Image (spheres, rainbow, N blue to C red):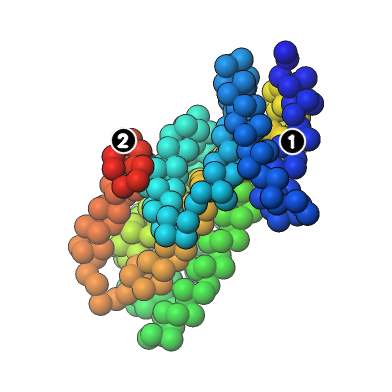
Amino acid sequence: MKQQQFEQQHGALWEDIAAILENRSPQPGALPALYRRLSQCLALAEQRGYSPALTDYLHALSSECHQRLYGTVAERPRALLQWMLHDFPCRVRAEWRLFAAASLAFWGVALMLGWLVWQQPQWAYSFIEPHQLERMRQMYSPGNVRMGRGGAEGDVMMFGVYIWNNVSIGFRTFAGGIFGGLPALFSLAFNGVHIGIVAAWLSRDPATIGNFWSFVITHGSFEITGLTLSGMAGMRLGLALLAPGRMTRRHALLAASRAMFPVTAGAALLTVLAAFVEAFWSASTTISPAIKYTVGAGCWIGVIAFFVLAGRTRVKGGDAA
């Protein structure tokens, strides 16, 4: 049986199960019987070698049924830990091609234009207005090292500003990805342009290089990673609509959404963490630049190690598999 016929034959069953799980069905007591039929569908899909998107969708639906029928409140913290330490990094590694494309869009543009401005500073004026560059120079100059802070109240206020700024950029990048992925790449490249030029511009000035790099090095590890992951997740949804394979576009988008949920939520957590670090650590004038560089380097190493190493062993019932 072809996959399209299989989906048409069992699609109503999956819809009924989804309605029960979303509390939209008047017959929630039918879930055990439907769950048994769903398990048969999953076994057939795997046996016949249907597309990974379909089997992932059925796996996710089956897991939700199992959790609804057999899960307990006491298991939820363990499930959350499992999700954060296993599902999140494993999903990022599984989508390494998209992650590489998103990273190239940001870092490739940033490094290329940064090198150009470092060699020929006048090129900076072709991308950023002179008054904006001057404002950045004044912001990181030794005479203005407070960078807009105002004590504890100023820290909280700036935390709100950073949250709004970081989340809005990440959300636009993610949302743009659904339109074929190109808007997400454009958003990443645009941010790469700005950061690359500003970094090179301020690094050429001995008066601003220290303040700038000691400010951005720590929270940048979380902020840039969160932005890149937002773009990656958005592109996966966009590709599901453009190339659904043997699934309908609706099922392909649903399967991609379920698969990318850990990445989207993880990117949001990184974005919030970046705003917190930026407000209460990066902008602090009581912490020496040497300590900031040390902690910042540790954060970058930690982020890279997490996505490379975390989730290599799956935890079930508290024991490593």
Packing grade of label 1 (10 A; few <14, some 14-19, many >=20) is some
Q: Position of residue 58 (x, y in %)?
A: 61, 33
Q: Is residue 6 above or below residue 304?
A: above
Residue positioned 73% across, 22% down in the render = 6
Q: Is residue 165 visible?
A: yes
Which quadrant holds residue 119?
Answer: top left
Q: Position of residue 161 (x, y in %)?
A: 53, 72
Q: Identify residue for label 1.
A: 13
Residue positioned 49% across, 51% down in the render = 71
Which quadrant holds residue 9?
Answer: top right
Label 1 element class:
helix
Label 2 element class:
loop
Q: Is residue 64 above or below residue 255?
A: below
Q: Is residue 144 visible?
A: no
Q: Nearer the viewer, residue 35 or 290?
A: 35
Q: Quadrant of the C terminus?
A: top left
Q: Quadrant of the N terminus?
A: top right
Tell me the mark number nearer the camera, choosing from 1 and 2: 1
Q: Is residue 299 left or right of residue 27?
A: left
Q: Nearer the viewer, residue 246 or 48?
A: 48
CA–CA distance in space, label 1 to label 2: 33 Å
Q: Is residue 296 left or right of residue 256?
A: left
Q: Position of residue 86 (x, y in %)?
A: 39, 43
Which quadrant holds residue 62?
Answer: top right
Q: Identify residue for label 2.
A: 321
The label on residue 304 is: none
Numbered-mark total: 2
